[in-house]
Image (cartoon, grey):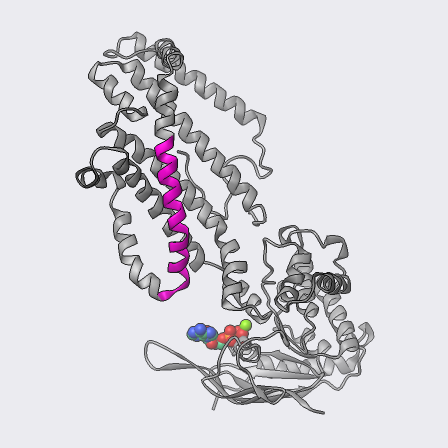
Amino acid sequence: MTAISAPQRKTGGGAEGRRPRRSIVLNLVAVVIGLAVWTLLASVGVQGMPGPAEVAARAVELVADGTLAMDALASLRRVLLGFLLGTLLAVPVGFLMGWYATARGLLEPYVQFFRTIPPLAIIPLAIVLMGIGEVPKVFVIFLASFLSSVVATFQGVVDVDKTLINAARVLGASDRTIFLKVVVPASTPFILVGMRVGLGSAWGTLVAAELIAAQEGLGFRMQQAQLYYDLSTIFVGLIAIGVLGLLMDRLLLLAERRLTDWQERR
Amino acid sequence: MTTKISFRDVVKTYPMREGTFTALDHVSLDIADQEFVTVVGPSGCGKSTLMSMAAGLVEPSAGQVLVDGEPVAGPGPDRGVIFQQYALFPWLTVRKNVEFGLKLADLPAEERRRRAERAIELVGLSDFADALPKTLSGGMKQRCAIARAYAVNPKVLLMDEPFGALDALTRVQLQDQLLHTWSQDQRTVMFITHDVDEAVYLASRVIVMAARPGRVQRIIDVGLPYPRTEEIRLSPEFGRVRNEVWHSVYHQAPAA
Ligand SMILES: Nc1ncnc2c1ncn2[C@@H]1O[C@H](COP(=O)(O)OP(=O)(O)O)[C@@H](O)[C@H]1O
Ligand SMILES: [Mg+2]
């Protein structure tokens, strides 16, 4: 996953949003150099290391027999389910914590504590408690996305500009109106950034969860390949994970740009 | 003349690590109906605190703040507030910002649209009605904030250094526009500024405050006729009042 910028700042590209052609050319050059170095490493015989051509051939096989699509779908399904559930719960809980001091006092110790535990560390516990089916995997992803979204939402609510709240109050707004018409829109950029971080950590957690116990999925496939020293398949898996992660991140970034187009960007 | 806003022996203290900090120390001040007063003073002397009490955003620690003879109990659309930082809702267009208060007043859509239109026209923003705040200059943002306040037709305008962040030219334009509107609707205006020229140009009375503790130092009658013109701004009488205000702001005797 790419780095996440603060909501006020703009990620990547020039101030105009479009990437200059020069930088695209440089990106392509970097990819070509990378492939060359990889080929070189493989040809001087780093133990068992496949070159790009071999990996590409393996990828074609995996695509042709449907394995790659099946694995990717299985992984995506888990991630999206956990991510959706996590975010769906995180947003109201984050609002509650930001808006009511009592809720904050009660929930913050738990949120802050669990946030310091890497979601991966929960896996052993989840497996013992929930077995080795889909539930523990989805749960760990749920937890990962919940924790990052809840903190972002809560921070967004706390950071809402007090003058905006006062501006609404002096126009006669009730607490309810202030919440719905000021706090919610004002914290949207924070929530979306939290979602992006959450999706990133969900994706990372998923693959690790699949390494442990699964019948399908990108992580499972790599785990299997490891048993047979099938490095090409591992490479295909890694690249698929990277590409899918990048795609999801870009989709959310696009949504974020759309929904928070009103922001002043400096 | 009836009194519109009345501060009676108002005290505001904030708890500190040791003891309390007195932001306002027994301030008494009456502002007449339809009067235009300006408040000047060094920063930290409690100008914003005083105004926020009239707005109902801050409660006095002691004493009373009355509007129309009634103690202020929270904010309300009868008192429009304009903040230095504009405080526009950045996700709403100019028109939607202006309609914000009208929606809260439960006006029918038709009426809302009409009144917003009129307020936007009054401040000269008609061409930008559908623009987002981020595309506006500072002066235009403040015009929009003023339109938003005018739209709900408040009896009192409370303005906290509204032109403080604007360039000199824009500032003069907005001052004239504000006076022009005021001459027609004769709202009561309490206008805070740190600019002595602005204080004298706009007001019939200038309230000079002093700091530590925040208090009213002097009240100076401007005694210049309305409408205020460039001629008045450049006249020797204006200069004299300006000097007087300047002196009482910048050469304050320390608190007894
Ligand atoms: N919520 C608060 N807590 C503590 N001190 C405050 C608070 N609000 C204002 N003050 C203090 O009260 C004094 C007056 O503030 P303010 O009314 O903003 O002054 P002014 O607008 O004249 O610059 C300042 O010294 C400020 O630090
Ligand atoms: Mg102030």
**B51 and A94: which one is in front?**
A94
Residue at image coords 50%, 81%: B211
**B152 and A79: which one is in front?**
A79
State yes or no: residue B199 in magenta.
no
- The secondary structure making up most of the magenta span is helix
| In the image: residue A179, left or right of residue A96 | right
The answer to which image quadrant residue A236 occupies is: top left
Q: Is residue B206 visible?
A: yes
Q: Is residue B95 above or below residue B19?
A: above
Q: Is residue B154 above or below residue B255?
A: above
Query: Which range is magenta?
Result: A77-101
State yes or no: residue A86 in magenta.
yes
Q: Quadrant of ligand 2?
A: bottom right
Q: Percent position (x, y) of residue A265?
A: 56, 47
Residue at image coords 29%, 8%: A44
Q: Percent position (x, y) of residue A227?
A: 20, 17
